[in-house]
Amino acid sequence: MSEIIETTQKKKVLSCIQPSGMLTLGNYLGALKNWVAMQDEFDCTFAVADLHAITVRQEPAKLRAQIYSTYALLLALGIDPEKHTLFIQSHVPEHANLSWLLSCNTQFGEMSRMTQFKDKSAKHANNVNVGLFSYPVLMAADILLYKPDLVPVGADQKQHLEIARDIAIRFNNLYGDVFTIPDAYIPKTGARVMSLQDPTKKMSKSDDNLNSWVAILDSKDDIIRKFKRAVTDSEACVRFGAEKPGISNLMTIYSAITEKSIADIEKEFEGKGYGDFKLAVGESVADALAPIKTAYDEIIKDKKALEVLYKQGAQKAEYVARKTYFKAMKKVGFVL
Ligand code: ATP
Ligand code: LTN
């Protein structure tokens, strides 16, 4: 009797995060919380996208420290580097290499429509470099090398995901089947956490106003203080609505952390003022983030142990990336 072999393969997930500063509550709710949750069901590959970080000017010593700290924070969040793959993007040269092949199959016009480029080039007007412009092509390479089914990201990355899909479809049509066409995986609550000081803007770790964002590693006191100072409106009624972007943002954060529905939150705070609500949001966020900070403080102390893990991660990633890269090279007509 022939042996029945279990062949059900897990679906694949890939995502990356830039080490461009302290990671925020927006990064956590929009992306990282999902990364952690998806590990049970999927075969996951996660990376610290250090090559992306230099699209804006970085001070070398600070960049190095941020790469370590981002990697350590991903471990602290609960990413399992043994069961999954956790690596540093620049350690796998196929990312930059594939990005060239893809660049030659991407139109200037389609890149010009990217809204993040418009925002970031306005913000860094003295350094509008070509990398900043073509960065979605590198992001497409990050994704396509690992043939993922799903890419967990915040809502701001939807456009970049769409272009990655377009590039993959075009490449496959021209040269034959090389890439899997991935889907974005965007959370229902928390996909777009807004600035605490200007709720019409995305919460961003590169915002100079430190009160506008909460870092995952902020102390409890800092977190509560930032929520107390959050910009709201003068109505003092905890109700969700487009005309109340500040309070709605806080309600979304509270909902994402506590998993309570917006309707239940409105009920819970009926008749109560913004002061009570802001304190409740601050405390729930601080309590959720506290264990991550405790784990991080331990992990970051041991650089040697980190090195073992990121080297092992790079080896695992490279094994997969090489295969896809060489297949793409061969299809395009290079001599291997
Ligand atoms: P910057 O703020 O410097 O532009 P960033 O935080 O947007 O950087 P990344 O660190 O690469 O850029 O983002 C990592 C992940 O976090 C992405 O999936 C992104 O969509 C998500 N993310 C970032 N900011 C938010 C936010 N305010 N709300 C929800 N998700 C977010
Ligand atoms: N572009 C993303 C970070 C990023 C990414 C990726 C996300 C780089 N490569 C691949 C998902 C998949 C950002 O700036 N937020």
Image: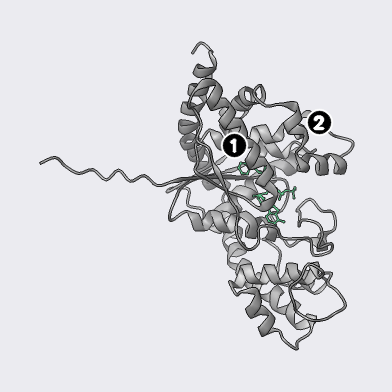
x then y, percent, for residue 15: 57, 45
Vertical comparison of 219 with 142: above or below: below
**Between tags 2 and 1, which lies in front?**
1
Relative to 245, 95 lies left or right: left
Q: Quadrant of the N terminus?
A: top left
Number of residues whose C-alpha sits closer than 10 Å to that of mark 2, classed few (under 14), some (14–19) or many (20 or more):
some
Residue at the farthest bottom position: 271
Read off the residue under disc 2.
129
Q: Is mark 2 within 8 Å of ligand 2?
A: no
In the image shown, does 113 or 123 lie closer to the viewer?
113
x then y, percent, for residue 120: 81, 42
Dot 1 lies on which element?
helix
Relative to 138, 308 lies left or right: left
Read off the residue under disc 1.
165
Residue at the farthest front position: 173
State the CA–CA distance, disc 2 to disc 1. Answer: 24 Å
Q: Residue at x 60, y 75 (%)?
A: 260
Relative to 119, 331 lies left or right: left
Dot 2 lies on which element?
loop
x then y, percent, for residue 146: 50, 36
Q: Residue at x 59, y 37 (%)?
A: 165
The first of marks 2 and 1 along the sequence is: 2
The image's colour scheme reads one colour
Vertical comparison of 245 with 39: above or below: below
Vertical comparison of 27 with 118: above or below: below
x then y, percent, for residue 144: 55, 34
